[in-house]
Image: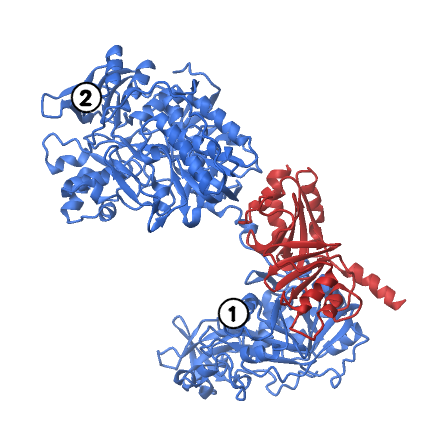
């Protein structure tokens, strides 16, 4: 019983960085040209491993997909997404796992990856960064136009279509940008910058939503 | 002219109300209303009129008052809107004295082919590139596409040029991957085909401008290939009185007649060196302006032009020049004479059209690194080889921008440039389409390049009315003075005379300045060259460049998960880098001093809490993690047991302190290092730099987790009791949870890592939870009756203990030993960053500045940071105060200072120099409170 009560309480206690923006995001999404919303509490794991190692292969099996090695590529496997961040670095995104403990415990994604990594060969780091960033979805016919106000990358569908990702700047904040669908992007930003990024996106979107 | 068609627009200029037509520039509307004097010149205060019909205007500068004040705009580029209020400028403008309510923004754009200029050549280039499937951007500074066609009214493919251009542009704009940008000036061409443009989006709409549309937009464009179809500017020769209102470029007058239906005068004389002034004269004559004479400096014009003039009864005076323009305040007559010295005559006229030939607009080409060559035929510099050995540019130049003189030539040249760009960008080039038809194109006779009409008496002093740069009031006399002073470079002449340095950057005058200089030096202008072209091509407002980076979006604001609570509690915020941190939490009626003293007392005597989430946190994982940390920190980290925590200092190779923080050992191969708030990114970069460049063999990965965690510092003698209440599962006893260890536990029902560390000297804990739970943890701790404190109290508490803040008490010239922390520098480790420097003579000299405490004799006197210290009666600065506070625990003020040989001076009396006042202080050890460390265990 006590455990149950604790779990409920934790759920109520959990607050995403952009919880306070929900209403403004909804207003901005009302016109149909744009959809802007926070996807809170995604599981996010920073993975560092030698792509050619047996450990990488085992981790790939655990993820259900080979780790992408093409720079700036993103692959999806069920409800997981694996983003290439560097030659030996990936960000694994998964659904909200709720209340996993701080250390080990539970059969969470992190534990599955740590287990797959093993300790026999090479060195692998799997770091929980779920609360380090939050995720914004920006979708709709004008999504690309909004991003182009603050992102120097070429976001043309032929260049940055579904399956592409990048670590880049949006306005003056570092973000991880992921093309999910032709007109749907995820913007992952550091929790401390989230308010700035949200304010900036709302301002940049003003032209397209009124 | 009152019968001009179009929608009436009402505006005000120099205090008088006028009517213009929708689509008029302010210059066109003023001319339509007979306003010829628009401004006064900056140096001489001479009346000036409208000289051109475009962005090259040197004379007609205006100040806009409504809709929003903006200084120094050429009347030739301002589109009138209802309610526009403007005044002519007496040289200088005035910025608005209130914030600009308009939006400004930026767009990053990418394309295969960027075409600059939507005249005949640019339109054809863009059309060809688009036809081949390229992503194309076509930008033009005018409100409508067409370029020269707008003003010449020449027909293309049987359509009036303006309509032909509009139809071509509309076709292009309808394509998915083509963007046509009007009112957009490309003002910079930087390396690797990065170009920057400004689009004026709402100025022409006046009060009807939508509030959500940016007034101006900066386009930052990356193009694989660029086609410069930038056209040419007409130039003028220097002759006496060439600055009078009524003197106007021939092409400009033609534009006013054809594009705006405005007659810029009633009786005109035309001075020309080439054939292009003839169609201008004929168009003006057709519009009802009397052409008193065409003064052609050549022996013969093109035959067809001569025939048409004869047909219209226009007098053509070949071999003649205009020796002077005359009039009181504006043109009333023109002195015409045979060039070889015959009888001069005074021809009454209110308009003098001048054409000295056409100068290609090579500014952007030159900015891109392109070299220029002199073209004898057109008498101007044109783009040189784009594929020269040392300059390979992904650039094509098309049309009159490279000296192509005819419309049909420009259309063909543009299409070819578009096809070259298409091929270079990697596209298959489609079959050539037949070029658009141009019907009326009489053969041209060669131009003659005349720069200067000699003064009547030929004396140097007589060149004071021969203007070279109208905007800077520079005359031929000024140029002659420069060359007379020995200057031989046009760059020097430019700076000596200021020619070419004004708002218009010498667009009409640059080549003329060079030609006059060359003439005076007996050189060929082809050899002398022109001054360097630099961005921006046209003035750009700071507001446009700032874009969205203003007000609350000026710089990112970083906040913690508890931020809203701090704000709701009324805490003023302190900027720490980009972070906003609560400074102190005043209760009703409390000032800062009272609040901080109360918070300090709570931490020292009871229990208090602080949001410490901003500290940088880095996960260090791998078999060689301990080895890496041993090399980075001055002290030993590899001996740290799992479950324990150690304070560490990092130095640069010069031995100076770079950062400090705690290191937590989570597992044999897993550490968590904390950094100062402001240095988190720099420390991670530092680690990566060493790992990637010097020690790639170390098997370690570093990952930032700064915002994964929210941290609540729980401080004070009662902190153990409060923690026990919040974490019933945690054994908080001093023996089972000793100082500098950590435990995983549930705190307030939230999974947490609790570290027993202290930045105050008191019994203290730092409770870390995933940042989602930061606010919940904060509220739960606060609900246990704990006093919140801000950064100011944190500073006081740590200073009382002599703990330095890196970056406040240090400045990059301070070693750990200087800070009294020799203990943190390992004597056992073989090496670490900075070690070698600790044996340098300079780092061991005894008179280095060392951290000490200071106690003012007046115990209420606060020493500001930065105050210098001297010996009583002395003048040599011994050092300065780095931190100064009021201490509740000490019951007095105190300070930390860096003082030369400070530790040897403990007990000495010094003076803190506050202006004229000398404040006596006593030097003490830097640890002022609880030097025995008795309080950390509670």
The image shows residue B907 at horizontal and vertical percentages of 47, 87
Q: Is residue B466 above or below residue B23?
A: below
Q: Colour of chain A?
A: red
The residue most toward the right is A1
Q: Colour of chain B?
A: blue
Q: Which of B118 and B97 lies nearest the eye of the viewer?
A: B118
Q: Is residue B288 visible?
A: no
Identify the secondary structure beneath mark 1: helix
Mark count: 2
Q: Which of B617 and A162 lies nearest the eye of the viewer?
A: A162
Identify the secondary structure beneath mark 2: loop
Q: Is residue B741 visible?
A: yes
Q: Is residue B610 above or below residue B468?
A: below
> Where does label 2 land, which residue?
B300
Dot 1 crowding, Cα within 10 Å, few <14, some 14–19, many 20+ = few
Measured in 3D between alpha carbons, the distance from the residue under mark 1 to the one under mark 2, in whole angstroms, is 73 Å
Quadrant of the drawing holding the N terminus of chain B: top left
Quadrant of the drawing holding the C terminus of chain B: bottom right
The residue sitting at 20% across, 25% down in the picture is: B326
Q: Is residue B109 above or below residue B348?
A: below
Name which of mark 1 and mark 2 comes first in the sequence: 2
Numbered badge on residue B689: 1
Q: Which of B911 and B563 lies nearest the eye of the viewer?
A: B563
Quarter of the figure with residue B705 = bottom right
The image shows residue B844 at horizontal and vertical percentages of 42, 86
The residue sitting at 32% across, 26% down in the picture is: B251
Dot 2 crowding, Cα within 10 Å, few <14, some 14–19, many 20+ = some
The image shows residue B674 at horizontal and vertical percentages of 61, 72
Label 1 resides on the chain identified as B
Q: Which of B53 and B828 lies nearest the eye of the viewer?
A: B828
């Amino acid at each position: 019983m006590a455990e149950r009560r604790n779990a409920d309480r934790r759920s109520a206690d959990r607050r995403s960085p952009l919880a306070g923006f929900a209403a403004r995001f909804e207003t901005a999404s009302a016109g149909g040209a744009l959809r802007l919303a926070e996807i809170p509490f995604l599981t996010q794991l920073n993975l560092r491993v030698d792509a050619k190692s047996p450990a990488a292969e085992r981790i790939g099996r655990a993820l259900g997909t080979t780790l992408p090695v093409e720079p700036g590529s993103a692959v999806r496997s069920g409800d997981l997404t694996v983003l290439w961040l560097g030659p030996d670095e990936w960000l694994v995104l998964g659904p909200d796992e709720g209340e996993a403990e701080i250390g080990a415990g539970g059969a969470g994604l992190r534990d599955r990856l740590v287990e797959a990594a093993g300790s026999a060969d090479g060195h692998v780091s799997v770091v929980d960064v779920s609360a380090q960033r939050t995720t914004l979805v920006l979708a709709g016919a004008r999504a690309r136009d909004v991003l182009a106000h603050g992102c120097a990358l070429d976001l043309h569908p032929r260049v940055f279509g579904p399956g592409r990702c990048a670590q880049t700047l949006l306005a003056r904040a570092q973000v991880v940008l992921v093309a999910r669908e032709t007109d749907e992007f995820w913007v992952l930003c550091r929790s401390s910058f989230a308010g700035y990024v949200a304010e900036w996106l709302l301002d940049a979107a003003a032209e397209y939503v009124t | 002219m009152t019968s001009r068609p179009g929608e009436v627009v009402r505006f005000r200029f120099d205090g008088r109300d006028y009517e213009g037509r929708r689509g008029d520039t302010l210059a066109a509307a003023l001319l339509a209303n007979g306003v010829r004097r628009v401004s006064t010149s900056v140096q001489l205060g001479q009346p000036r009129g409208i000289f051109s019909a475009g962005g090259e205007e040197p004379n007609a500068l205006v100040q806009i008052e409504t809709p929003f004040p903006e200084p120094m705009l050429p009347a030739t580029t301002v589109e009138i809107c209802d309610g526009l209020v403007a005044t002519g400028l007496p040289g200088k403008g005035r910025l608005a004295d209130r914030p600009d309510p308009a939006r400004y923004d930026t767009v990053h754009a990418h394309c295969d082919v960027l075409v600059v200029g939507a005249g005949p050549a640019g339109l054809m280039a863009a059309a060809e590139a688009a036809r081949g499937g390229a992503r194309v951007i076509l930008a033009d500074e005018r409100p409508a596409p067409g370029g020269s066609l707008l003003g010449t009214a020449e027909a293309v493919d049987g359509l009036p040029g303006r309509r032909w251009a509009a139809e071509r542009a509309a076709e292009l704009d309808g394509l998915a991957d083509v963007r046509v940008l009007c009112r957009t000036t490309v003002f910079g061409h930087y390396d690797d085909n990065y170009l920057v443009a400004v689009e004026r989006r709402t100025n022409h709409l006046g009060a009807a401008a939508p509030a959500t549309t940016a007034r101006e937009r900066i386009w930052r464009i990356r193009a694989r290939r660029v086609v410069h179809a930038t056209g040419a500017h007409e130039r003028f020769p220097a002759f006496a009185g060439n600055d009078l209102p009524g003197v106007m470029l021939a092409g400009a007058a033609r534009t006013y007649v054809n594009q705006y239906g405005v007659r810029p005068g009633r009786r005109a004389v035309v001075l020309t060196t080439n054939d292009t002034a003839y169609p201008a004269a004929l168009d003006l004559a057709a519009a009802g302006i009397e052409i008193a004479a065409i003064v052609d400096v050549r022996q013969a014009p093109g035959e067809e032009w001569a025939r048409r003039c004869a047909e219209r009864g226009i007098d053509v005076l070949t071999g003649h020049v205009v020796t002077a323009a005359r009039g009181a305040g504006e043109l009333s007559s023109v002195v015409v004479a045979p060039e070889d010295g015959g009888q001069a005559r005074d021809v009454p006229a209110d308009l003098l059209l001048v054409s000295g030939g056409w100068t290609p607009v090579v500014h952007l080409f030159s900015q891109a690194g392109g070299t220029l060559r002199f073209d004898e035929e057109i008498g101007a510099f044109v783009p040189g080889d784009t594929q020269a050995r040392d300059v390979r540019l992904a650039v094509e130049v098309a049309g009159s921008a490279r000296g192509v003189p005819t419309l049909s030539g420009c259309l063909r040249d543009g299409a070819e440039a578009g096809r070259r760009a298409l091929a270079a960008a990697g596209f298959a080039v489609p079959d050539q389409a037949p070029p658009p038809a141009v019907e009326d194109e009489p053969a041209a006779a060669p131009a003659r390049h005349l720069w200067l009409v000699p003064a009547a008496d030929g004396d140097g002093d007589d060149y004071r009315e021969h203007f070279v740069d109208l905007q800077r009031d520079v005359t031929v006399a000024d140029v002659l003075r420069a060359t007379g002073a020995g200057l031989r470079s046009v760059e020097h002449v430019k700076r000596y005379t200021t020619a070419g340095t004004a708002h218009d950057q010498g667009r009409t005058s640059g080549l003329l300045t060079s030609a006059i200089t060359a003439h005076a030096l007996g050189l060929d202008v082809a050899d002398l060259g022109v001054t360097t072209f630099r961005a921006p091509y046209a003035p750009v407002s700071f507001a446009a460049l700032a874009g969205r980076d203003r007000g609350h979006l000026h710089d990112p604001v970083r906040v913690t998960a508890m931020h809203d609570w701090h704000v709701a509690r009324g805490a003023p915020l302190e900027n720490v880098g980009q972070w906003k941190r609560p400074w102190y939490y005043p209760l009703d009626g409390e000032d800062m001093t009272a609040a901080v003293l109360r918070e300090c007392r709570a931490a020292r005597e009871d229990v208090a809490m602080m949001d410490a989430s901003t500290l940088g946190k880095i996960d260090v994982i791998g078999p060689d993690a301990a080895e890496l940390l041993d090399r980075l920190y001055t002290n030993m980290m590899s001996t740290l047991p799992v479950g324990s925590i150690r304070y560490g200092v990092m130095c640069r190779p010069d031995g100076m302190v770079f950062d400090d923080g705690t290191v937590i050992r989570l597992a044999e191969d897993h550490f968590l290092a904390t950094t100062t708030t402001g240095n988190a990114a720099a420390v991670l970069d530092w680690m990566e730099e060493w790992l990637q460049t010097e020690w790639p063999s170390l098997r370690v990965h570093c990952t930032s987790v700064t915002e994964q965690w929210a941290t609540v510092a729980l401080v004070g003698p009662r902190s153990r009791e409060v923690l026990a209440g919040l974490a019933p599962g945690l054994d908080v006893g001093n023996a089972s949870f000793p100082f500098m260890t950590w435990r995983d536990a549930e705190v307030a029902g939230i999974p947490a890592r609790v570290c027993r560390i202290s930045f105050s000297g008191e019994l203290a804990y730092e409770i870390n939870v995933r940042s989602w739970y930061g606010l919940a943890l904060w509220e739960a701790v606060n609900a246990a009756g704990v006093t919140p404190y801000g950064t100011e109290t944190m500073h006081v508490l740590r200073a009382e203990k002599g703990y330095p803040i890196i970056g406040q008490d240090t400045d990059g010239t301070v070693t750990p030993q200087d800070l009294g922390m020799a203990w943190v520098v390992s004597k056992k480790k073989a090496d670490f960053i900075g070690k070698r420097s600790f044996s340098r003579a300079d780092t061991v000299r005894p008179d280095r500045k060392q951290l000490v405490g200071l106690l003012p004799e007046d115990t209420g006197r606060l020493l500001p940071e930065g105050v210098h210290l001297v010996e009583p009666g002395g003048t040599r600065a011994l050092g300065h105060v780095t931190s100064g506070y009021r201490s509740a625990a000490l019951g007095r003020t105190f300070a930390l200072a860096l003082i030369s040989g400070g530790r040897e001076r403990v007990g000495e009396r010094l003076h803190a120099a506050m202006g004229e006042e000398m404040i006596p202080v006593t030097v003490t050890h830097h640890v002022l409170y609880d030097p025995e460390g008795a309080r950390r265990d509670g």
